[in-house]
Image (spheres, rainbow, N blue to C red):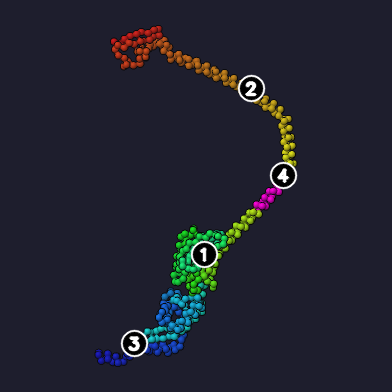
């Protein structure tokens, strides 16, 4: 058993790690004796401050799932990096940073100690620009398909854009220029501004500006327009304004959005979806002042129209009054003649009408006299009958009438006795009859 194992050890080939790595290095050198161009996305880009060398990683992701499918360590030596970086940024308008897709010329190396790596020798900015353009076109296409690309542009612009929500960095020089331009407008229009601070450059620009828009939305009734401005800066910083999320939020915002992010070149996607795009913060202020001038001009035109209309009405009324004044004597004479004729007819008819009227009232008075006499006679008869009945009732209720009918009245001290309970022995009583009275004492 041991003998067989020794034979196996003598037959197999054993290499040290260094020998293996040297063979791999030789194989790589034989396979890639020259440089080649590769497409990849840059990741973890960092620069050594002391040496000036740039170290990064090149990665490739699955276009469907987004999962990482390949990775390689890369480096750009300081001498190459000093020329390559400014050239790339000038051509693309983007910072040389992680997340960009690049086409680079590399040499493939395998070091015994550090392993596989790529050394960048050159870069093609046109590839990155093309990729950026493709991304921009994809975002624009998506916004259009969702039907939001022109929503903000379709909002009616306020006649007097006085209440302004400003989204910018509070330390931006462009912000001060904007405020000064508004405050010193020649016409003295009042503007009311409220700052909503946001980062205007760097990786957090997108989320910062969206958060500022959310804060404005919570007080939307207090504002007429939203202004997004930045005071200059590197063109490469504009990449944040080509964001889908920022553009979608801006496009669907319920107030008109005006941009002035300080660049002369092609519009960003944010500029495209905004209601109005101006070049600089100062230009935004001039635009707002111009809108106030436009409203003032319309008011002045309306004033002139009102004055002209009033003058025309007064002129027509003056002509009418003059015409009426010239015809007034004739109209007055005609009216007087008609009234005189009317009065004459009334005067001639008056005796007849008066006689008829008097006869009518005489007949009415005679009828009323007859009715009054009949009513008085009937009333007197009713009153006489009432008096007779009353007299008879009084007679029947008198004590004398009661005594004549056989009754008697007993009095004590001049008062009629109604109950025996009130009498005592010794009381003197008087009993009255129809023909006299009797006195008695109770024993």
Q: CA distance from mark 3 to mark 4?
A: 126 Å
Which mark is nearer the camera, 4 or 2? 4
* Residue behind mark 4: 325
Q: Give whichever of discs 1 and 2 has the lower sequence position.
A: 1
What secondary structure is marked by label 2? helix
Which mark is nearer the camera, 3 or 4? 4
What secondary structure is marked by label 1? helix
- Residue located at (40% from left, 81% from top): 50
**From the viewer's perspective, is residue 37 above or below residue 418?**
below
**From the viewer's perspective, is residue 257 above or below residue 346?**
below
Magenta stretch: includes residue 90: no
**From the viewer's perspective, is residue 62 above or below residue 388?**
below
Q: CA distance from mark 4 to mark 1?
A: 62 Å
- Residue located at (51% from left, 69% from top): 261
* Residue behind mark 1: 180
In the rendered structure, the answer to whether residue 267 lies left or right of residue 352 reads left
Query: Of helix, strand and loop, which mostly describes the magenta segment?
Result: helix
Query: Mark number for residue 366?
Result: 2
Q: Give whichever of discs 4 and 2 has the lower sequence position.
A: 4
Magenta stretch: includes residue 314: yes
Residue 137, image x and y in percent? 52, 72
Q: Give whichever of discs 2 and 3 has the lower sequence position.
A: 3
Q: Which span is picked out in magenta? A: 309-321
What secondary structure is marked by label 3? helix
């Amino acid at each position: 058993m041991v003998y067989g194992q020794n034979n196996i050890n003598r037959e197999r080939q054993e290499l040290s790690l260094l020998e293996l790595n040297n063979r791999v290095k030789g194989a790589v050198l034989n396979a890639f004796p020259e440089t080649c161009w590769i497409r990849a996305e840059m990741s973890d880009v960092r620069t050594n401050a002391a040496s000036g060398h740039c170290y990064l990683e090149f990665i490739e992701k699955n276009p469907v799932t987004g999962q990482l499918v390949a990775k390689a360590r890369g480096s750009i030596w300081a001498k190459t990096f000093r020329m390559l970086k400014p050239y790339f940024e000038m051509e693309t308008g983007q910072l040389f940073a992680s997340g960009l897709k690049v086409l680079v010329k590399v040499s493939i190396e395998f070091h015994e100690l550090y392993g596989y790596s790529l050394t960048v020798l050159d870069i093609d900015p046109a590839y990155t620009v093309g990729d950026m353009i493709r991304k921009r076109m994809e975002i624009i296409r998506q916004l259009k398909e969702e039907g939001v690309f022109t929503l903000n542009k379709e909002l009616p612009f306020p006649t007097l854009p006085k209440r302004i929500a400003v989204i910018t960095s509070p330390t931006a020089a462009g912000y001060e220029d904007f405020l000064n331009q508004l405050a010193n407008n020649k016409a003295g229009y009042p503007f009311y501004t409220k700052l909503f601070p946001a980062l205007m450059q760097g990786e957090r620009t997108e989320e910062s500006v969206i958060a500022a828009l959310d804060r404005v939305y919570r007080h939307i009734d207090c504002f007429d327009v939203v202004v997004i401005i930045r005071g200059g800066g590197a063109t490469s910083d504009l990449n944040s304004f080509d964001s889908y999320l920022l553009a979608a939020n801006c496009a669907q915002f319920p107030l008109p959005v005006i941009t002035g992010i300080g660049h002369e070149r092609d519009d960003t996607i944010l500029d495209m979806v905004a209601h109005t795009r101006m070049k600089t913060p100062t230009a935004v202020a001039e635009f707002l002042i111009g809108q106030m001038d436009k409203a003032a001009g319309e008011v002045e035109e309306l004033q002139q129209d009102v004055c002209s209309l009033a003058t025309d009405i007064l002129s027509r009324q003056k002509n009418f009054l003059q015409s009426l004044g010239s015809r007034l004597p004739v109209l007055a004479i005609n009216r007087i003649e008609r009234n005189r004729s009317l009065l004459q007819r009334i005067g001639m008819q008056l005796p007849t009408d008066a006689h008829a009227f008097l006869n009518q009232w005489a007949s009415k008075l005679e009828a009323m006299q007859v009715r009054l006499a009949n009513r008085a006679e009937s009333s007197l008869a009713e009153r006489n009958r009432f008096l007779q009945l009353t007299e008879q009732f009084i007679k029947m209720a008198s004590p004398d009438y009661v005594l004549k009918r056989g009754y008697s009245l007993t009095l004590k001290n001049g008062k009629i006795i109604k109950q025996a309970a009130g009498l005592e022995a010794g009381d003197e009583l008087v009993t009255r009859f129809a023909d006299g009275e009797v006195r008695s004492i109770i024993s």
